[in-house]
Amino acid sequence: LLLKRLFSLRVIGITGSFGKTTTKELLLSILSQDGNSVASIGNIDPIYNIPTTILRCRPWTKYLILEMGIEYPGEMDFYLWLAPVDIAAITGIGLTHTEFLKDTNTIRQEKFKITRDARHVVDYSKKPPELKNNLKIATEVARILKIDSRDIKNGLATFTPAPHRMHRINHPSGAIIVDD
């Protein structure tokens, strides 16, 4: 990635079976406090989303946050060729996309390719799927990037979950509905 060599762009790659989008949005909220940040849009298939997101970077972009979900063996290799990551963040890993990845071992092996050249790895792959883990991953990545604790706090305070991601609805009956 030319921008990495010419300017000090830092690339953060996020993979896992669940929690990628929320972690990405949390990181975007935090890192935007420190400098121009670009992140994958929504939850679009990465085969289109990653190249399009990279093209949105400008010389003054400080952080590139990529959601690197995979469905096929070898897919992560392509993403890492496009954008070698400085920091790899791995959310929980479970039995997903088994049509092509077959089993948990293959899923884990393919997703862990993200760590190959990363200088730092934040690994929550063995944790249960919980929102607090996404918060911990985002905070840990921010600390690796030496983001000021006030910026982390402000980023978390201004964070708005993406639609249908841990959206709390207080029903008139008194029930709490979590739209996820």
Image: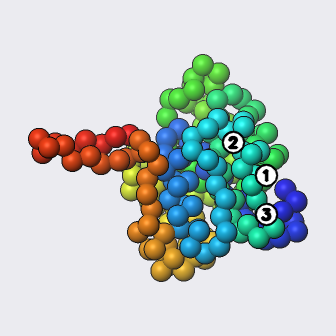
Residue in view at x 81 percent, y 67 percent: 59
The spot of residue 120 in percent (x, y) is 66, 62
Residue type, mark 1 in image: Leu
Question: Between disc 3 and disc 2, whose residue precedes?
Answer: 2
Against 157, residue 64 (above or below) is: above
Graded by Cα atoms within 10 Å as few (under 14), some (14 to 19) or many (20 or more), the crowding at tag 3 reads: some
Give the quarter of the figure containing the N terminus. bottom right
- Residue 137 has which mark? none
The spot of residue 65 in percent (x, y) is 65, 56
The spot of residue 7 in percent (x, y) is 83, 70
Residue in view at x 57 percent, y 26 percent: 97
The Cα–Cα distance between marks 1 and 2, rounded to whole angstroms, is 10 Å
Task: Give the residue number, with chain letter if any, for mark 1.
Answer: 55
Residue type, mark 3 in image: Arg
| Residue closest to the eye, 82 or 57 | 57
Residue in view at x 41 percent, y 69 percent: 157
Give the image quarter of residue 56: bottom right
Graded by Cα atoms within 10 Å as few (under 14), some (14 to 19) or many (20 or more), the crowding at tag 2 reads: some
